[in-house]
Amino acid sequence: MTSPLRRSRRAERWTLPLAFLLPFFICCLVFACSGFFPFGDKQIMASDEWHQYYPFLVTFREKLRTGGSMQYSWDVGMGTAYAPLYAYYLASPLYLFSALVPLSVLREYFALMTVMKLAFAGLFFAYFLKTVFRRSSLSMAVFALGYALCAWACGYYWNIIWLDAFALLPLLIAATVVLLRDGRFRLYVLALALTIWSNYYIGYMCCLFVALFFFAYCFVNWQGGRNFGKRFVRIALGTVLGVGMTAALLLPMLLAMQGTYSSRSIEVRTFAMNIAEGAYGDLAAAGGLWSLLKNETLPGMLSAIRQVLTQLLTSPTITSMEGLPNIFCGLSMTILSVLYLFDGRIRLREKLMCLLLLAFLVLSFLFRPLDYLWHGFHFPNMLPYRFSFLFPFVQLFMAYRLWTHRDTLKKWTLVPAALAGLLLIWNDVQLGDVVLRQTVLSALVLAGTILALAVYAPTGLRRTLGTVALCAVMVMEMSVTFAYGVDQVGITTRTGYPRDNDAVQQLIAYANGLEEGTPFFRMETSQTQTLNDGALNGYHGVSMFNSSANVVFNRFSHSLGLSAWPGSNRYAYYESTPFANTMCAIKYLLNRESVTVESPYTVSIASAGSTKLLRNESYIAPGFMVDSDFADFVSEEYRHLSLDEQARLFASVTGVAEPLYEKLGSEALDATADTSFSKTGGTGTSFRYIAPEGAEDAAVTVRYQVPHDGLVAVSVYAPSGTKEVDCSRNGELVMSRKTRVPLVFTLGACSAGDELTFSFDVDAGTANNISLQVAMQDDAVYERGLAALRDEPWQVTQWDDTCIKGTIDVKQDGIFYAAIPYERGWSATVDGEPVELAPTYDPQETNVRGTDAVISFPLTAGAHEIVLTYRSRGLVPGLTISGVCLLAFLALVIALRRRPVLMPDERDGLDPAERVGRRARRRAALATLAGEFDPDGDELPEEDEALSDGDETPDGEDDAPEADDSEEKTEEGESDAQTEEPMDR
């Protein structure tokens, strides 16, 4: 028969591996059942993974393999600062290994990283429990599963960039406990630095939680003001070192983020609330503070809290885009948390602090000022309550705290626990919209949990049955919820991503061959597959979706005719007008559509399969001279007729006063039955529809007649009620385009008499306006303007990630224009002399000057050499700060290498040398209690206070065992030192 000592060591060895493997295998099983490759043709890419995370990983891998600059990238948009993009999307240490992964299986590595991060979350949570409770238990792996697969992970697992900090939080809190309890600082500094580095955004939320935890810990373990001061100095010093070591990442990111849409200042009302309908917190409208509290805030709080509580039930409605906070970590854990409150062995102050932490998090879900604080002084665009993973963390601590006292659990406490579970189910039913799956599963889990706890006894068969039954309930509950979460998030088909990849790569290689010796050229697709097709397919493009997008250029880009959406940090190119192609310096277009838009300005030069490579005949160069009037051009935010904006821009850069476009009037309006549709205003470009409730397949159509041969350009904008427009010529569908933001596109060359129709599917029960402008390009006007621009091109001689050199022969004074978005960090010299860029640059301004949006400056007649250089602002100071903090940390480690304890607490007035060492205590405890272990060997002797400082040796004595310790063998031939917790090795 295996001895209790050997079983305890088995638990010691397997606790952490099991905590990693359990979520790993559950995730793999769920993904395999969902048809993920190689078990099907599905892949993990969903939403932003499709548009951002994977394309950015492709560019990062390429930079690692080729030694590209980490300061700037030309594959994302028309060029963007790379430091903030790396900091938010690519700083995970696991991404470094992508350089070793073949591109053909990079998507599978991407999925593997997702699973591994969730598995590491389980591993680190088990490590947190071991550190706090100073014990080893196989059951820790089950509680760790509750964290690794909590509702936050189920709903946001596709946000792979957040998973590192989510996984590292338990390690960071474990390190905080060791810092405050034992004075050991090394793990705290390293864990904090790694958490912030891997994702500064979620890392910031973890830092706020560390601050809350610090005060909670000190309150629970109050040992006088003097020790509080020492603890504060310890954590402050460790925080300065940890944060300072990431300054090389944070400082360039913070400076770059000042130029994004998120940097704008907004008003936040003190009593404005989320979730509670109509709780806007407007004091004036409510008629005073008391009236606001009575009629809006308090009723709103009650309603919102009841809705939040529904998320504690089994298999809740997972929030993956919009919805309630993801706080579920198991209804069984909630029951144990309720029992925690009835446990007389746990001090009142510990219970109070746990309840206060949970209450503060709930208030943070409800009140917008707190929500604003948690999200880095910014309200997120979708994906709400991104800090909600902190709620399961606290709740799981409470649940495991109770689990360690299950031997002394009073059976009568199961009654209020069961009532609490029934109350949660009743609350969900009373709110309406009952989901049968959730109600049934919750009832089953509640019954199973209560029954397992009722059966449980401290010894014998009932102990084994109760433990196994409860752990089985927990594992099944979390597995079912994660499977439902994957179904909620959705999956995509592997085939076709990237679209027509083989053909596209052939044509990109062909274009590169044509441009051999050319330092730089730009290309795009006629129809985007993702909003970062350049990054995904490996070419210098135009479209971009990036949280660190330059907002000034984003606002200006709608004047170019791009589909610009500053509030969502994106702008996209759809096959646009010749003028837009010229201003964006697009030389080639990839057409993957079944219908090719014919135009004298885009000529097909090659094809592979159904994909064609088109050359832009109106291409000039990456830069050229424009008219001096461009200095006065201002792009106004609320101009929705982008063709008018483009015509204004054309006149300002060419000096040609004649109109570029001839506007067409609509010939007929059609609508389905019961839907009204008519023109509004006097411009002939605004239309209004009213689709009544219940109107099925409601649609409206506008028809135009082409008066003469020529190129047709279209501008469209329909912010709500419809998603896209179908564009047809003579009854044949040519293309479909998104309508939520203003954009310009072309239908190509049309003939006199062609009928053009634009059809919009509209939502029933909506009434909205549609802006639609159709025009013919005046080719003679455009050719005059193009000739004026072509006369003075910038001949580029050198182009790399951060430096561009070229010469230009200026015939008359004007403005040099480069098709490069300006952002702080760019500098320019002309013949070796610096010139000023973007003199009125202001990210807070909604109406922006063209000279602030792109690199441009006045230039006199004559031959000049122009050099453009980019340097990440804050990089050098950040590297300096990181270096100083790293050296200071290393110096502190070396100075305290014998006793790695920083400013130890004063305890009971005893000299540390008088205390009994941990190993001696452990041997005595094992000798005395050897017969009282769990028959399965999953428990070590309990300590009454999980977060208490207890009688631990504070001054590093544990790390200096007596000389004969290493020689004393167990019956497995192992040293006693191997029974030590890893935290104290």
Image: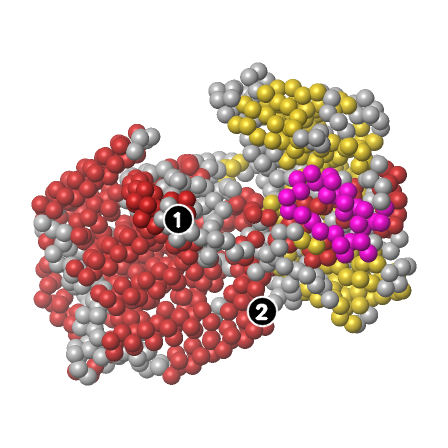
Is residue 685 on the magenta stretch? no
Q: What element carries label 1?
A: helix
Q: Decide which of tag 1 and tag 2 comes sooner along the chain.
A: 1
- Return the residue nearer the eye: 948 or 851: 851
The residue that label 2 is drawn on is 874
- Relative to 541, does residue 481 appear above or below in the rendering? above
Q: Is mark 2 on a helix, strand or loop?
A: loop
Measuring 12% from the left and 42% from the top, which residue is drawn there? Answer: 415
Q: Compute the Cα span from label 1 to label 2.
A: 42 Å
Measuring 81% from the left and 40% from the top, which residue is drawn there? Answer: 660
Q: Which mark is residue 283?
A: 1
The residue type indicated by label 1 comes to Leu
Is residue 635 on the magenta stretch? yes
Query: What's the magenta bit mostly, secondary-structure-wise?
Result: helix
Measuring 47% from the left and 75% from the top, which residue is drawn there? Answer: 886
What percent of the width, then of the height, locates residue 440?
A: 26, 32
- Relative to 28, does residue 694 appear above or below in the rendering? above
- The crowd level at tag 1 (other Cα within 10 Å; few <14, some 14-19, many 20+) is some
Q: How is the image coloured?
A: secondary structure
What percent of the width, then of the height, locates residue 445?
A: 23, 38
Camera-nearest label, 1 or 2: 1
Q: What stretch is highlighted in magenta?
A: 628-656
- Return the residue nearer the eye: 980 or 915: 915
Measuring 58% from the left and 32% from the top, which residue is drawn there? Answer: 723
- Relative to 283, does residue 440 appear above or below in the rendering? above
Which quadrant holds residue 601? top right
Quadrant location of the C terminus?
Answer: bottom left
